[in-house]
Structure formats: structure tokens, C-alpha cells
Amino acid sequence: MARLSESARVPAPPETAWRTAADLSRLGEWMTMHEAWRGEVPSELTTGTELTSVVAVKGMRNRITWHITSYDPPHGLTLKGDGVGGTSVSLALSITPDGGGSRVGFDVEFGGKLVFGPVGMTVKRALKGDVNASVANLAALLR
């Protein structure tokens, strides 16, 4: 399993950071791995909400069925998903006060056949770049 964590300090207060980061209809504006939602994104999210998206890492696309496993506005949310070929993904977003702004954290776990063997090392490197870019993109939206 590939596990990565990244965070960034942003000048926005937690409530403002939450409104942008937890608005899943805007996920494509900052998360580089997110290609598209399949179906409508509910306007109201809760623990147990199910969504389907296409995720791409290093050009490899996979349809993921997500479940929101924790939802705690404005502090964090966790999505866990399963995709084709035994792929599993967990995305955890955390937002904590940091001075006059916030610290936005992003933890990703990627599992399944894709993260083992020679291809796995390539996927892990690409995933690290995607996570770093996604956090930087979100921070830029919140500046």
C-alpha cells in the first residue's frame, strides 16, 4: 500500500478552507488525480454518502466507488473507495486552525495490484507528485 501525507498553511480561516475543500463539485479545480464525477454530486454530504468518480494516476484511469466514512465540518472528511482490479483508495482531508489561518492536510492510501512490483514504484512516485500538486493547488485557491 502506498501512503502519503502532505499539508500546507493557508491564510483562510478553517470555515473558509472547509467550504472550498469539502465542496466535492469543485474537486477538479485542485485535485490533480480527480478526472470526473460519474453522476451528480449530492449538495448535502453525510457519513455514508456514496459517489463514483474516475481517478487517474500516471495516465492510468480507474473508476472508483467512494463512501464518505467520516464527515466532521469544518475539521475533516474521509472518503474510502474501491475500484476496478482490486484497487482501494482512502483520502482524508483535515483542516486545523493555524494562527490567523489554517493548516490543510491531505492523507492518501492507495492499495491493490497497481502498487506492487515495478509498476508500483512508478505509481507511488506519480502519486507523490499528484498529492503535492493537489495540496499546492488547494492552497492557491485559498489565498
Image (spheres, rainbow, N blue to C red):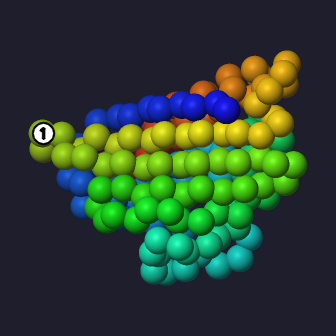
Observer-nearest residue: 115 or 37?
Answer: 115
User: Image check: 27 left or right of 18?
Assistant: right
- Could you say which quadrant of the image residue 140 lies in? top left
Residue at the image point whose x is 66% and y is 57% from the top? 81
Indicate the position of residue 119 as horizontal and vertical percent values.
84, 25
Element assignment for label 1: loop
138 lies left or right of 133 = left
Residue 64 in sight: yes
Characterize the local packing of mark 1: few (<14), some (14-19) or many (20 or more) Cα atoms within 10 angstroms.
Answer: few
Q: Residue at x 54, y 31 (%)?
A: 4
Q: Residue at x 25, y 46 (%)?
A: 96
Which residue is tagged 1?
99
| Coordinates of residue 42 in the picture (x, y in percent) | 55, 79
Q: Is residue 120 left or right of residue 67?
A: right
Residue 112 placement (x, y as % from top left): 77, 40
Residues 16 and 94: in front is: 94
Q: Quadrant of the C terminus?
A: top left
Q: Is residue 54 above or below residue 123?
A: below
Would residue 9 appear left or right of 42 to someone viewing this image?
A: left
Depicted 37 relative to depicted 140: above or below: below
Can residue 59 be seen in the rendering of this structure?
no
Labels in figure, total = 1
Q: What amino acid is found at the position of numbered circle 1 in the picture?
A: Gly
Image quarter in which the N terminus is found: top right
Q: Position of residue 10 (x, y in %)?
A: 28, 41
| Residue found at x 40% / y 65% | 71
